[in-house]
């Protein structure tokens, strides 16, 4: 009972606090923490669902009206959650190490960017951009194109294992990015490094602010992605993937069709990225190849593993933690240090105003991120929310 | 690892984080009406950090130098540096954070047009002014937003300036062009190429490369074709090694580059081999009094030579402060819209010439200098010779 | 098409490609050593490599300001600098293994990979922090060792520089040394035993932890030497310079068959040749439609093709699968 009260009170109090202190990142983090608590605390399932539902559907948009920045963070978290879930299928369930996952994201993004912007005219003559409502059909187009690309990548690499697969997917990711960067001649498909803009944004039924409407759109897609994932995990093919991950030979002997299972894993994983690519390009209004570097692939992989490989809540939490860490916590920390510096605060007899520019806190966010990755792996190698089956397996060791 | 230990670790981390971030809660009350913040957004980490930091430091220097009048009027002026990591998604999220901080009146940034374009869509939501020191992509201002300005030239201006010089002064007949496959490098290289071809010069090679260290395979065909001029569209950290390796391998052509070469590191890297290289730049030669003062102050404060765009960032910030002085004449904190409007009215005369913005935020008239590297001593970068001076207006918006 | 030109530059492109290939091979040795024993991609190797380059440049700059650079004989300087770079990189590699990888030895193999990536991010900015405090500079430039800049003209169109020859000679020496170490010494036998089966090796009285540390030591030292030679060859380094060559070298190691020392050498050379030919010839052959910017696509496509037909790399041994 006390836990139920604690969960409800936590969410209520922290969301109220965010409304009171809309600029304080700490308070917003507490709000996110209370959500996490509501998720892990041993409380009745209905209460949990209600709390999370109310928080995401009502509280979050309300908070967003106080500070639009949180809306942006929530939207990006949504995008990365879907990406992490997609990669989780390939890496976590099927055990195929993919270091070029962002390629599928790029394929989806470019498919809407080309047709949803005046750039289409360069390729096909007049008639572009397509009317904004075409965004919705293009969600499916992005899905199909990315899934097709996934199969295209999957076919040649069926025989490869382990790190050979990793290097080929890495190469594939780079090939897609370099192609996007170079295909402005001989035929101008992607407009090269100069990128494509302006990309149409979809019309939204909601009459509130656009970013809140967009948040709901992303939330809806993420919910669908999560549902699909949960169905997949316990389905025939999901079990086949896990069998394949544990022991390919044994799986084959037990009648798992390896070729089909692998191709399906690539296609499923890629399709989520394709859908989110379409959403991303509409959100950004502008895309160019800089958004699709190898480091992005690594970032998504870190999310999956940090959260707990092969686990859906793990991928969700991992994506949230990494995105919030990068966009909020580390930025917040360096902004706060900057405040202290500007105010000339003295710590241990040293006046921060005299801090040399070499030690500018904003420059070392990535260093701290790297350190956190290492520490997380050392102290919690199974991830934040390990998959149940994997947990048992690790327990054996 | 026992669960209790995990819990301890988590608890300690959480506590440390909480203590570290606690004062953010009081930050709101601390910022009274009297604070005006100027934000910079540029990559402060990653491979482009040197240039990004130059932007930040240029702004910092300008704020310290020009904030006097605003402080006399009772405002506290602060710099807030943001790291956009050269990534569009980080830039956009920072932009949202910036517009949520009502004390921020101007953004100086970005380095990459790919980050600037989506981020400025966000600034536009709240009419927050952006003055760009480095985004040369035409699309940055061609969208015609009232809040987006730049003090640097456009690719489609700087390219033709180089071409004019190459044909008019150097009298070249053949040219070989290499660029770095970025928005900036490719943009300026293509503008250069198009104008050269219009003027009847034969472009016998046009190559892009993302390579940073080893240019051998690119140079071999250049050496075989022996052009009159080799142009590199890009930044000095690629341009200098490229020119150096080309000269060492026996390429005898003249070298020309855009303002990305304008750094003392260019000769630090290239040494004797790059003496004689020409580059186009909008920043006045250091022999002019203002530019010399800037260079000396920058050096005495930060103990290093200015990067390319540090001067532009300094000018952009100076313009922003001038506009802020105008907008705060009533003694009250101005609205963002008023600041953006005031920026469009500023007429500023500084080391990049007289800057006035046209109705889409480009400088009305950009003066360009063609400089020639005269010594391999990085400390004497300021003594490079001025080979020619050209003033070209930004092209009107094509409808 | 200009055939005399195409044929005329061929030997030079071949030379350029070989040189680049040896560079990749040197870095790839570090990846392959560690992989051979632990079956784990040491992502932080690119930083281990660049630390060697930084130590090298610091010593050279120190010598230069002391006025010793011109007076001391260059082979001595180069050898000393390389030794220092090797020492520093080896020490770094061993400590990284101790701190970030050893606690994860029993974990699934992707866990140390992420730890390595985190280490790589962390180290890049640590190097930047140290360099910015020490020299207040981001880009560092190797001082020229004049005798190494000498160029030997083979014909009027083909030439090769002394430093390139040094790179090739050192790479060959190191390959030979490493190969001998692994195959002909007692330590080598122990390393191979640990690579084969850690549990069985420890039952045979081999101190597995010590052998793994030793592997990192050797791999790190190779990386450090490669770093110094990289600096001497290309002169410009910054804290992020190591990343791309590291990635390429890793590709080379896989191409040759990861875990296999001659394979790393072969993979490096193949990759170097592919890149050089693509960068020099693509534009000439396609009339400018596809230029040097496609060299990575070309190289990676060939890599994929090779791996389709030889899934274990060019000289790959059959590697055991692990979950």
Image (tube, rainbow, N blue to C red):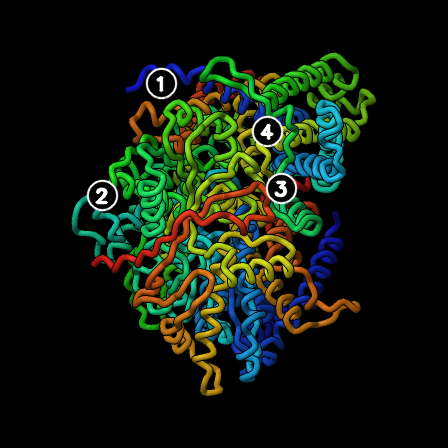
Q: Chain of mark 3?
A: C
Which of the 4 quarters of the picture holds residue C294? top left
- The residue at which mark 4 appears reads as C233
The chain holding disc 4 is C
Q: Nearer the viewer, residue B196 or A294?
A: B196
| 3D distance between C-alphas at marks 1 and 4 | 27 Å
| Residue closest to the eye, A114 or A70 | A114
Q: Earlier in the sequence, mark 3 or mark 1?
A: 1
Q: Check if mark 1's residue and mark 4's residue have beta carbons within 8 Å.
A: no
Please report whichever mark, 1 or 4, sits nearer to the chain's N-terminal start.
1
Position of A91 with respect to C207 (left or right) is left
Of helix, strand and loop, which one carries label 1?
helix
Question: Residue C55: in sight, yes or no?
Answer: no
Residue at image location 54% in from the left, 61% down from the top: B58
Q: What whole-number distance in Å separates the C-alpha atoms at marks 3 and 1?
A: 37 Å
Query: Quick one: SS at disc 2?
Result: helix
Label 1 and label 2: CA atoms lie apart by 35 Å
Which residue sits furthest bottom? B330
Proximity of marks 4 and 3: CB atoms separated by less than 8 Å: no
* Quadrant (top left, top right, bottom left, bottom right) of the C terminus of chain C: top right
For label 1, the residue is: C5
> How far is mark 2 from mark 4, CA to CA?
44 Å
């Amino acid at each position: 009972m006390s836990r139920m009260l604690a969960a409800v009170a936590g969410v209520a109090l922290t969301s109220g606090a965010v409304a009171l202190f809309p600029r304080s990142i700490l308070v917003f983090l507490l709000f996110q923490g209370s959500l996490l608590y509501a998720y892990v605390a041993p409380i009745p399932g209905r209460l949990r669902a209600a709390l999370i539902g109310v928080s995401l559907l009502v509280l979050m948009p309300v908070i967003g009206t106080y500070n639009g920045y949180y809306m942006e963070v929530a939207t990006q978290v949504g995008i990365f959650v879907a990406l992490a879930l997609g990669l989780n299928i390939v890496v976590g369930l099927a055990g195929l190490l993919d270091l070029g996952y962002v390629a599928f994201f790029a394929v989806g993004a470019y498919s809407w960017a080309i047709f949803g912007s005046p750039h289409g005219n360069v390729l096909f003559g007049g008639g572009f951009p397509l009317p904004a409502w075409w965004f919705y059909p293009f969600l499916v187009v992005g899905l199909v194109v990315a899934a097709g690309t996934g199969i295209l990548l999957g076919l040649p690499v069926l025989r490869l294992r382990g790190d050979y697969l990793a290097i080929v997917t890495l190469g594939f990711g780079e090939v897609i990015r370099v192609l996007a960067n170079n295909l402005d001649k001989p035929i101008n498909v992607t407009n090269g490094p100069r990128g494509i803009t302006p990309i149409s944004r979809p019309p939204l039924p909601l009459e509130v602010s656009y970013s809140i409407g967009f948040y709901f759109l992303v939330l809806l897609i993420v919910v669908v992605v999560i549902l699909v994932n949960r169905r997949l995990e316990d389905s025939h093919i999901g079990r086949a993937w896990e069998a394949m991950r544990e022991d390919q030979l044994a799986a084959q002997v037990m009648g798992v069709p390896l070729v089909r299972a692998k191709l399906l894993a690539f296609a499923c994983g890629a399709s989520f990225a394709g859908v989110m690519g379409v959403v991303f390009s509409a959100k950004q209004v502008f895309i160019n190849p800089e958004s699709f570097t190898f480091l992005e692939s690594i970032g998504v992989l870190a999310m999956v593993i940090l959260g707990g490989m092969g686990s859906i809540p793990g991928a969700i939490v991992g994506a949230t933690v990494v995105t919030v860490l990068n966009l909020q916590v580390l930025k917040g920390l360096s902004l706060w240090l900057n405040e202290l510096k500007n105010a000339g605060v003295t710590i241990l007899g040293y006046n921060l105003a005299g801090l040399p520019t070499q030690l500018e806190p904003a420059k070392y966010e990535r260093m701290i991120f790297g350190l956190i990755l290492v520490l997380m792996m050392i102290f919690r190698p199974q991830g934040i929310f390990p998959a149940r089956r994997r947990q048992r397996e690790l327990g054996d060791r | 690892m026992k669960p209790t230990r995990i819990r301890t670790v988590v608890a300690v981390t959480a506590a440390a984080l909480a203590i570290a971030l606690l004062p953010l809660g009081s930050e709101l009350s601390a910022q009274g009406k009297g604070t005006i913040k100027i934000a910079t957004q540029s990559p402060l980490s990653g491979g482009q950090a040197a240039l990004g930091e130059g932007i930040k430091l240029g702004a910092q220097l300008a704020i310290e130098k020009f904030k006097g009048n605003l402080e006399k009027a009772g405002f506290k002026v602060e710099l807030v540096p943001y790291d956009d990591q050269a990534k569009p998604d980080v830039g956009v999220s920072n932009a949202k954070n910036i517009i949520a901080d009502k004390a921020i009146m101007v953004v100086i940034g970005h380095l990459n047009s790919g980050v600037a374009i989506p981020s400025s869509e966000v600034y536009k939501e709240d009419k927050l002014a952006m003055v760009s020191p480095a985004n040369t992509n035409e699309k940055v201002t061609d969208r015609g937003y009232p809040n987006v300005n730049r003090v640097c030239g456009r690719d489609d201006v700087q390219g033709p300036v180089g071409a004019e010089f190459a044909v008019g002064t150097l009298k070249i007949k053949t040219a070989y062009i290499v660029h770095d496959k970025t928005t900036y490098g490719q943009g300026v290289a293509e503008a250069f190429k198009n104008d050269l071809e219009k003027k009847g010069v034969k472009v016998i090679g046009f190559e892009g490369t993302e390579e940073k260290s080893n240019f051998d395979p690119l140079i071999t065909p250049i050496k075989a074709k022996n052009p009159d001029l080799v142009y590199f569209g890009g930044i000095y950290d690629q341009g200098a090694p490229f020119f150096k390796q080309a000269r060492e391998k026996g390429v005898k052509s003249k070298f020309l580059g855009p303002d990305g070469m304008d750094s003392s590191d260019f000769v630090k890297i290239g040494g004797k081999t790059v003496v004689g290289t020409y580059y186009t730049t909008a920043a006045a030669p250091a022999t002019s009094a203002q530019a010399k003062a800037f260079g000396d102050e920058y050096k005495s404060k930060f103990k290093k030579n200015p990067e390319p765009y540090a001067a532009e960032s300094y000018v952009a910030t100076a313009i922003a402060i001038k506009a802020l002085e105008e907008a705060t004449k009533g003694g009250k904190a101005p609205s963002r819209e008023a600041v953006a409007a005031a920026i469009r009215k500023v007429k500023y005369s500084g080391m990049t010439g007289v800057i006035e913005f046209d109705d889409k935020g480009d400088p009305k008239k950009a003066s360009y200098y063609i400089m020639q590297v005269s010594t391999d001593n990085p400390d004497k970068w300021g003594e490079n010779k001025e080979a020619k001076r050209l003033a070209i207006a930004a092209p009107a918006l094509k409808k | 098409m200009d055939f005399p030109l195409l044929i005329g530059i061929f030997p030079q492109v071949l030379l350029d490609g070989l040189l680049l290939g040896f560079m990749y091979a040197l870095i790839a040795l570090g990846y392959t050593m560690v992989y051979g024993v632990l079956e784990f991609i040491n992502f932080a190797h690119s930083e281990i490599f660049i630390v060697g380059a930084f130590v090298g440049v610091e010593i050279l700059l120190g010598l230069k300001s002391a006025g010793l650079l011109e007076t001391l004989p260059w082979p001595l300087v180069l050898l000393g600098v390389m030794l220092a770079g090797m020492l520093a990189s080896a020490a770094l590699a061993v400590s990284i293994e101790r701190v970030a990888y050893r606690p994860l030895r029993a974990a699934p193999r992707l866990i140390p990979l992420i730890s390595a990536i985190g280490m790589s991010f962390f180290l890049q900015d640590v190097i930047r922090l140290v360099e910015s405090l020490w020299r207040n500079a981001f880009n560092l430039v190797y001082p020229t060792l004049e005798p190494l800049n000498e160029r030997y003209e083979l014909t009027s169109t083909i030439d090769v520089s002394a430093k390139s020859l040094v790179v090739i000679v050192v790479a060959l020496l190191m390959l030979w040394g490493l190969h001998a170490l692994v195959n002909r010494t007692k330590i080598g036998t122990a390393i191979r035993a640990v690579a084969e089966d850690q549990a069985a090796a420890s039952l045979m009285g081999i101190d597995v932890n010590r052998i793994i540390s030793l592997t990192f030591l050797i791999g790190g030292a190779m990386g450090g030497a490669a770093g110094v030679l990289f600096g001497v060859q290309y002169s410009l380094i910054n804290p992020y310079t190591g990343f791309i060559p590291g990635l390429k070298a890793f590709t080379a190691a896989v191409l040759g068959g990861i875990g296999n020392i001659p394979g790393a050498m072969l993979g490096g050379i193949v990759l170097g040749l592919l890149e050089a030919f693509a960068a020099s010839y693509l534009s000439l052959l396609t009339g400018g439609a596809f230029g040097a910017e496609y060299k990575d696509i070309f190289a990676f496509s060939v890599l994929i093709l090779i791996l389709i037909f030889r899934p274990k790399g060019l000289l790959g041994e059959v590697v055991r699968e692990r979950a």
